[in-house]
C-alpha cells in the first residue's frame, strides 16, 4: 500500500485551501500514473472555461456563466456569475499529455503524474479539446 496516498474525503469536506470556498463540485481520482479531476460547471459554455496548472499540485478552474435575458422573474438565483476554485491535487502532475473533455456541463481532466526527476515551471493554461 502506498503510504504517501491520501485517504478519500467524504462529501461535504475538503482538502482544498482553507478559507477558499468551492463554487462547484469536483471529484478527484488518484490512479497509478494519472490524476483525474471531474468538475460540474452548470451553465458554463466550453469557451468560457479556463484551466490553469499553477504549480505541480495546484489547479485553478474558472468558468463564466452567462446571464439569462428576460423579465418577469419571481425568483432569480441563477444569474450570470463567475465560478472559480483552487484545487489541491493528490500528486504532482505535468501539463504535457493533459487531456480534457467537456459534455453536459461536466469537464473531465486527465493529468499525467510527474516523474521524480521532471522539472516544470507550472503556471500554464490547459486547453479544452
Image: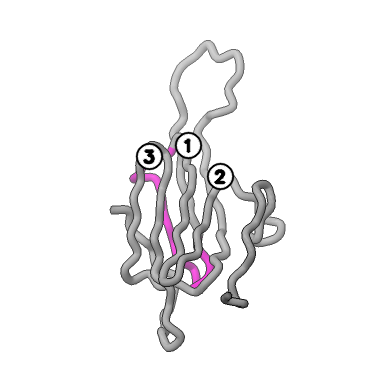
Residue sticking out furthest to the front: 1
Pointer 1 residue:
42
Residue 45: mark in rendering: 3
Residue sticking out furthest to the right: 19
Q: Nearer the viewer, residue 46 or 29?
A: 29
Magenta stretch: dominant SS?
strand
Residue interval drawn in magenta: 44-59
Residue 14 forms part of the magenta stretch? no
| Tag 1–tag 2 contact (CB < 8 Å) | yes
Residue 104 placement: quadrant:
top left
Which of the two discs, 3 and 2, sits closer to the camera?
Answer: 2
Q: Nearer the viewer, residue 101 or 119?
A: 101
Label whose residue precedes the other's in the sequence (3 or 2) = 2
Mark 1 is surrounded, within 10 Å at the Cα level, by few (under 14), some (14 to 19) or many (20 or more) other residues, namely: some
Residue at the spot x=40%, y=57% of the render? 109
Residue sticking out furthest to the top: 72
Residue 69 placement: quadrant:
top left
Q: Taking 2 as reference, is 110 above or below it?
A: above
Quarter the N terminus occupies: bottom right
Q: Is residue 108 left or right of residue 58?
A: left
Mark 3 is surrounded, within 10 Å at the Cα level, by few (under 14), some (14 to 19) or many (20 or more) other residues, namely: some
Secondary structure, mark 1, is loop
Residue at the spot x=38%, y=63% of the render? 125
Pointer 2 residue:
24
Q: CA distance from mark 1 to mark 2?
A: 8 Å
Q: Taking 59 as reference, is 93 above or below it?
A: below
Q: Nearer the viewer, residue 109 or 79?
A: 109
Residue at the spot x=47%, y=37% of the render? 42
Q: Taking 55 as reference, is 52 above or below it?
A: above
- Can you give x and y, in whole percent of width and height, for residue 24 in the image? 56, 44
Amino acid at each position: 500500500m502506498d503510504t504517501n496516498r491520501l485517504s478519500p474525503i467524504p462529501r461535504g469536506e475538503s482538502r482544498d485551501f482553507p478559507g477558499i470556498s468551492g463554487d462547484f463540485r469536483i471529484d478527484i481520482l488518484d490512479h497509478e500514473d494519472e490524476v483525474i479531476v471531474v468538475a460540474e460547471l452548470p451553465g458554463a459554455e466550453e469557451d468560457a472555461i479556463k484551466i490553469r496548472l499553477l504549480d505541480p499540485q495546484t489547479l485553478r478552474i474558472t468558468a463564466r456563466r452567462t446571464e439569462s435575458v428576460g423579465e418577469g422573474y419571481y425568483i432569480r438565483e441563477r444569474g450570470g456569475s463567475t465560478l472559480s476554485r483552487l484545487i489541491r491535487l493528490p500528486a504532482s502532475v505535468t501539463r504535457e499529455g493533459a487531456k480534457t473533455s467537456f459534455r453536459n456541463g461536466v469537464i473531465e481532466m486527465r493529468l499525467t503524474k510527474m516523474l521524480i526527476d521532471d522539472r516544470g515551471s507550472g503556471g500554464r493554461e490547459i486547453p479544452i479539446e
